[in-house]
């Protein structure tokens, strides 16, 4: 064999091995991501005896704004290193009204939460 052909065949074998390893690692990390992070749900808020996912409350924000009869679905978690949200959307509370419209509200802007007494229709 010619020395050029020997060099190309050795370099081609090494390159094929490197490409194969990259493909296998890419597939491994995609599957690992799919199993752990895909479909992640927001963190939930629950204060025993006061707030749960089924409790409707009135949330007062700064600037005389309020949300009547909303429930707390969860919040965006800013503690994780890898997040799919922009930095500006971290630390927000997710509220849902009776028509199932959802609102993201900055947690720092909540001034007061009023939970009405339980009645027959609101009981958990």
Image (cartoon, rainbow, N blue to C red):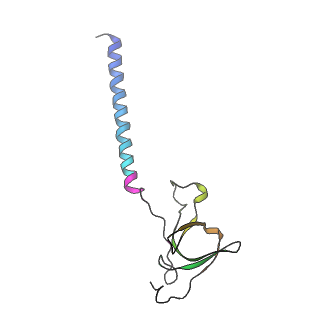
Q: Residue furthest front?
A: 99
Q: Is residue 13 left or right of residue 90?
A: left
Q: Position of residue 29 (x, y in %)?
A: 39, 47
Q: Position of residue 89 (x, y in %)?
A: 58, 59
The C terminus lies in which quarter of the figure? Answer: bottom left
Q: Position of residue 117 (x, y in %)?
A: 54, 88
Q: Which residues are magenta?
A: 33-51
The N terminus lies in which quarter of the figure? Answer: top left
Q: Is residue 109 magenta?
A: no
Q: Residue furthest right?
A: 63
In this orientation, which residue lies closer to the viewer: 83 or 104?
104
Q: Position of residue 9 (x, y in %)?
A: 32, 19
| Residue at left offset 54%, top offset 55% | 85
Q: Main secondary structure of the magenta part?
A: loop
Q: Is residue 35 magenta?
A: yes
In this orientation, which residue lies closer to the viewer: 94 or 23?
94
Q: Is residue 29 left or right of residue 92?
A: left
Residue 8: image quadrant is top left
In the rendered image, the vertical position of residue 101 relative to residue 21, given as above or below: below
| Residue at left offset 37%, top offset 51% | 32
| Residue at left offset 36%, top offset 22% | 11
């Amino acid at each position: 064999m010619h020395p050029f052909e020997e060099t190309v065949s050795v370099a081609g074998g090494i390159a094929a091995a490197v490409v194969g390893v990259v493909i296998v690692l890419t597939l491994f990390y995609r599957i690992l991501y799919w199993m752990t992070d895909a479909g992640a749900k927001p963190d939930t808020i629950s204060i025993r005896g006061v707030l749960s996912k089924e409790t409707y409350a009135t949330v007062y924000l700064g600037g005389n704004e309020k949300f009547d009869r909303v429930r707390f679905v969860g919040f965006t978690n800013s503690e994780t290193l890898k997040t799919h949200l922009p930095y500006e959307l971290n630390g927000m509370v997710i509220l849902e009204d009776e028509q199932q419209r959802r609102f993201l509200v900055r947690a720092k802007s909540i001034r007061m939460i009023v939970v009405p007494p339980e009645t027959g229709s609101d009981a958990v």
